[in-house]
């Protein structure tokens, strides 16, 4: 039984004995200089918020067992990021962690799209790289800490990410992350605002990446799938199971699926990965109206072993297709959209 607020104060002179949020700076290698907020809930759930990487969640564990994916890139400082290199694929050199935000005006694969809405004759088009710019932008940290609400203690952090250029987009992301003391869930609330005065395209996607030891041979993908709308050619070529995962394999080519999900009676989509051997489950839920589309990314390559759960505002066809078929979200001046996502870690 966890102590109440008064009893906790009697037992310790500092809340950090139970849990809390601590600001640190990473100091070595490609991560040097990144500010990180260390969350510990006291239940065994611990995770790091990378302030200088869009306030995405990097390392994440429960009971000492990791579930957030760690790639060979590490949590690379955004100052090292080459946005336009490698024909837009340089995003892959900074791709690691439980969450990597894609957006704010573009997701999925890159290319050139018209820039006429910005009314600047020298800028006839905008060239996007893979998954946009947001994931490699530092945040302005506006606050963090612990807040008591009666007997409930909320661990929280909030920051602002700005994606802007003169004669181009002026988009602002305000991100709030919360977890309860003794709790086993992470709550993410994002608000994206067009802070400018020209209609601006908006696309948004979370690359939620789960890795070993949660991901292992025999781990299961759970989702209420109505139908699979699209899959990459590699699915037919390799035929790796996307519901009960095999172990890692050298040379594996990513398999990607767009699944149409059935929302619950409460209007929420829910997906998750279960490892029965560990007795561990990690699930994610979000309002279907906010992220109506969902992708499953299966990356079983040796040394890069991961599965990605990807709520999205748009179909897999991407930016140019969304403009052509009318599904692109155009944010008017000062217009906002808000997204709510909850991660839960538990036992099977």
Image (spheres, helix red, strand yellow):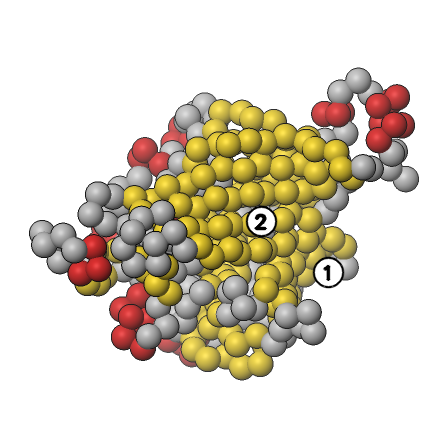
Q: Residues within 10 Å of mark 1 (few under 14, many from 20)?
A: some
Measuring 52% from the left and 76% from the top, which residue is drawn there? 260
> Mark number for residue 188?
2
Q: Which mark is residue 112?
A: none
| Total marks placed | 2
Q: At x 13% / y 58%, what residue is drawn? A: 124
Quadrant position of residue 43: top right
Residue 154 appears in view: yes
Compared to residue 294, the image places residue 25 above or below, namely above
Percent position of residue 109, x then y = 31, 62
Task: For marks 2 and 1, give the CA distance.
Answer: 27 Å
Element under label 1? loop
Point out the tag, 2 or 1, that comes first from the N-terminus: 2
245 is higher (above) or lower (below) than 118: below
Residue 120, percent from left and from top: 14, 52
Instruction: Report the residue at 21% width, 63% height from top.
Output: 113
Which quarter of the rendering shows the C terminus?
Answer: bottom right
Residue at 47% in and 73% down = 258
- Find numbered disc 2 in the image and state the secondary structure of the residue it sits on: strand
Residue holding disc 1: 276
Report if residue 89 is visible in the image. Answer: no
Q: Residue furthest top?
A: 13
Q: Which quarter of the figure has residue 147?
A: top right
On screen, 260 above or below 278? Answer: below
Question: In which quadrant will I find the N terminus?
Answer: top right
Residue 335 percent location from the top left of the image: 41, 55
Residue 282, image x and y in percent? 66, 56
């Amino acid at each position: 039984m966890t102590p109440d607020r008064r009893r906790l104060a009697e037992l310790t002179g500092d809340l950090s004995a139970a849990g809390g949020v601590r600001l640190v700076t990473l100091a070595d290698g490609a991560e040097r200089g990144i500010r990180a907020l260390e969350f510990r809930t006291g239940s065994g759930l611990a995770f790091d918020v990378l302030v200088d990487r869009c306030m995405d969640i990097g390392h994440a564990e429960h009971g000492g067992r990791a579930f957030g994916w760690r790639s060979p890139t590490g949590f690379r400082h955004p100052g090292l990021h080459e946005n336009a290199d490698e024909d837009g694929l340089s995003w892959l050199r900074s791709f690691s962690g439980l969450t990597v935000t894609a957006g704010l005006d573009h997701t999925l694969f890159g290319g050139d799209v018209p820039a006429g809405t910005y009314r600047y004759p020298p800028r006839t088009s905008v060239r996007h790289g893979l998954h946009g710019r947001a994931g490699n932008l530092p945040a302005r940290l506006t606050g963090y800490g612990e807040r008591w609400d009666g007997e409930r203690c909320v661990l929280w952090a909030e920051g602002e990410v700005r994606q802007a250029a003169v004669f181009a987009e002026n988009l602002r992301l305000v991100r709030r992350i919360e977890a309860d003391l003794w709790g086993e869930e992470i709550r993410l609330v994002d608000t994206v605002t067009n802070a400018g005065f020209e209609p601006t395209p908006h696309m948004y996607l979370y690359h939620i990446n789960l890795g070993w030891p949660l991901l292992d041979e025999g781990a299961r993908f759970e989702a209420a799938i109505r139908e699979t709308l699209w899959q990459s050619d590699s699915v037919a070529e390799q035929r790796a199971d996307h519901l009960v995962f095999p172990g890692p394999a050298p040379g594996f080519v990513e398999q990607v699926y767009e699944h149409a999900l059935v929302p619950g009676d409460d209007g929420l989509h829910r997906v998750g990965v279960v490892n029965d051997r560990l007795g561990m489950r990690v699930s994610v839920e979000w309002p279907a109206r906010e992220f109506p589309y969902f992708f499953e990314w299966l990356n079983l390559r040796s040394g890069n072993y991961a599965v990605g759960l990807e709520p999205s505002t748009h179909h897999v066809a991407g930016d140019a297709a969304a403009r052509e078929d009318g599904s692109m979200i155009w944010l008017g001046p000062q217009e906002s959209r808000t997204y709510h996502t909850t991660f839960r870690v538990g036992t099977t």
